[in-house]
Each structure stands twice: as C-alpha cells, then as structure tokens.
Amino acid sequence: MARCLCHHKSWHLKASIAAQHHHPYRAAYDPRHPFRLTAMPLPKLLAIGGAHIDRRGQVSGVYVPGASNPGRMSEDVGGGVFNALRNAVQRGVEASLMSVRGADAGGENVARAIGEARIRDLSVVFLDRASPSYTALIDRDGEVIAGLADMALYELVFARQLRRSKAREEAAAADAILTDANLPADALARVAELASGKPLFAIAISPAKVVRLQEALPRVTCLFMNLREAASLAATGADAGASEIAARLRAAGLGSGVVTEGGNAVTGFDADGIFAIVPPKPTSVADATGAGDALAGATVAAMMYGKPLRQALREGIAAALLTIGSPKAVAGISDRALAQTLELVPQPQRVA
C-alpha cells in the first residue's frame, strides 16, 4: 500500500509540474487500479471563427434613444468562437483557433489574448487589412441595446483559407470542431466538410447571420442560439415559443440544439426529444454579453468528456450564471465555483 501511495504522490507532483507548463494531459481514474492515476491526453477542440476586438459601451442611467447617454466604454478581445473556446479551455480542453485578422494594433491585441488563453494560434494575418471588430451598446442592466459588426475581412478571405492543406490537417487531428456564423455561408459549408463525421458544434451569433448555417444543419452536432436567432433560422413568427421552434429545427435536420431566452427556461433538444431547464436567478448582474458564449463553451467541453447534452447543458448554464456576474465577457471560473453553482441548476424536464 505504501508503494501505491508513493506512486500516487509522485504522479501528483508530475501533474502539478505539467500544469505549470500547460502540459496537455489530465488525471484519469482507472477502476482496475483504484490507487493509481494515469495521464490521459486532453480532448482536442479546433475552433474556426471569430476572434476580434470587442467594444462595449454601457449606459449608466436609463437609456434614451436618439440622445446622448452618459456611460462607460471598455475594449477587450472577443468573438463568439473565441469566447466559447476560452471557456472550454477552463474546463480542461486542449484548444486551437483558426481565424483571420489584420496586422494592426487590434490584431496584435487579439494575438496576445489568444496566447494568454493557452490556445494554439493558427490564424492568418493580412498586412494590408484592418482587423474585424464588434461594438455593443448595453443598458445599465447589462442587456444589449444594439451592436455594430465591422467584419468585412471574414467575408472576404475565410472560405479561401479553409481550402488550404493546413485546414485539412488541423481538422483531421482534432476530436471536435467548433464554429460560428461570423463565417460566410460558403466557409461554413467548408467547415462542415472538414468535420467529416466528427462532432461539429456551432454558435448562431445573430438572427441575420444564423441563416448562413441552413445548408450545413444536418452535419451540425449541436447549435447554440437565443430565441430570436432560433426563430430566424426556423422561419417562424415572433410569437412562436421555444419548444415549437425546436420541433421545426429538428424536422429541418438539426440533430440537437440549445435555445436560450434571457433569464427564462433554456430549451434543448436531442434525439430523445425536447427538454427545458429553468436556471436559478443570478446572484448579481454585471454584463450579460458573454453569457451565451460561456454556456456554449462549457457545454461543449462537458460533451467532449462524454456527458450527454442534457447534463452537459447544466454545466453550461452554471458557467453562464457566473459570467453574468462578471464585468468581463469571459470570467475566470474555477472548478469549485462551477461545482457550487451547478448544485443550484435543476435537472432537465421533458417538454415533448
């Protein structure tokens, strides 16, 4: 027994050293050897999509349309895929990011943020182009009033970059692929081809952009949307409920998906039907901007570790709750904080 414990302590020391150097291995319990921990490779997630400058202007009082509103402006690096990917890394996933940017100050900030997040940067830099950016105006409660997307570079070059051999090689080495509708439709079709039977996760981004995923829907493993985005994709009226929209998307060939509706129930669907999880009220609200990306990233990570969508989504909701309480689009979420919040998230309830 002493010998086993010594081995156990030695492994912990090696694991601690590996963690300090960001070594892509995790501890795994082997039931055949209950006193032995083995090092297992982290699941590899390749993200293809937006990583750009994110500006957020928050109104300090009651928002008055058409008038000058006092408030505060902040700038960070964001993007649907990048924000979700950073959340997945916090949950123990080895990540790579394929995006495009310019050789300007914004691009330098994006590159720095990718490195700080311990993500392999596979992005292409264009010397004569400006980096994409997104500017959001949010009210004092953290809800988005309007957004401005300056992302011409994605439209112009992404599809061409995905036809290169490097894209095929990286996709072949990944265990799953995560993308977003910041990409034009032809680039998203190419991503679906690159997935080649591997899990393909997608983020809707906006009601205007989610329709770009229409042709790729049968190949998407799970799509993350809010209610307005889901209604746009399903071509339903504004008064349609989440469960009705989910039924239409299933009929359109989407295998599984998640539909959020602010602080209301989160609706999910998979091969077994439609279900809902009613999230607890957040203890504090700082900025809801990155909550959907946190939900997507944490859910994807849990699914890559083998959890079914219904349980993985509970972890995603817990991550979203913690993000809402943070002024940052990507909150630093510890395992302990996630576990404590997860205890407050109820089990999914069958809807249909």
Image (cartoon, rainbow, N blue to C red):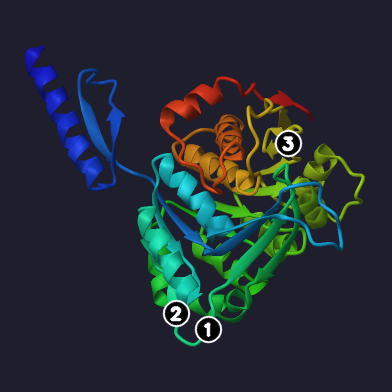
Point out residue 261 in the picture as x, y percentages from the top left corner: 76, 40
**Which amino acid is tagged 3?**
Thr
Where, quadrant-wise, is the C terminus in this rendering? top right
Give the residue at mark 1.
129
Give the residue at mark 2.
103
Estimate how packed mark 3 is, as few (under 14), some (14 to 19) or many (20 or more) residues with alpha carbons within 10 Å.
many
* Position above or below: 31 against 249: above
* Position above or below: 169 against 39: below
> In this view of the protein, can residue 162 be seen by the observer?
no
* Position above or below: 26 against 96: above
* Position above or below: 348 against 239: above
- Residue name at image x 11 percent, y 12 percent: 1
Point out residue 4 in the picture as x, y percentages from the top left corner: 12, 18
- The disc at residue 15 is none
Q: Which of label 2 and label 3 is nearer to you? A: 2
Say what secondary structure mark 3 lies in: strand
**Which amino acid is tagged 2?**
Ala
Tag 2 and tag 1, C-beta contact below 8 Å = yes
Q: CA distance from mark 1 to mark 3?
A: 40 Å
Estimate how packed mark 1 is, as few (under 14), some (14 to 19) or many (20 or more) residues with alpha carbons within 10 Å.
some
**Which amino acid is tagged 1?**
Arg
- Residue name at image x 70 percent, y 37 percent: 268
Q: For residue 203, which quarter of the picture?
A: bottom right
Give the residue at mark 3.
267
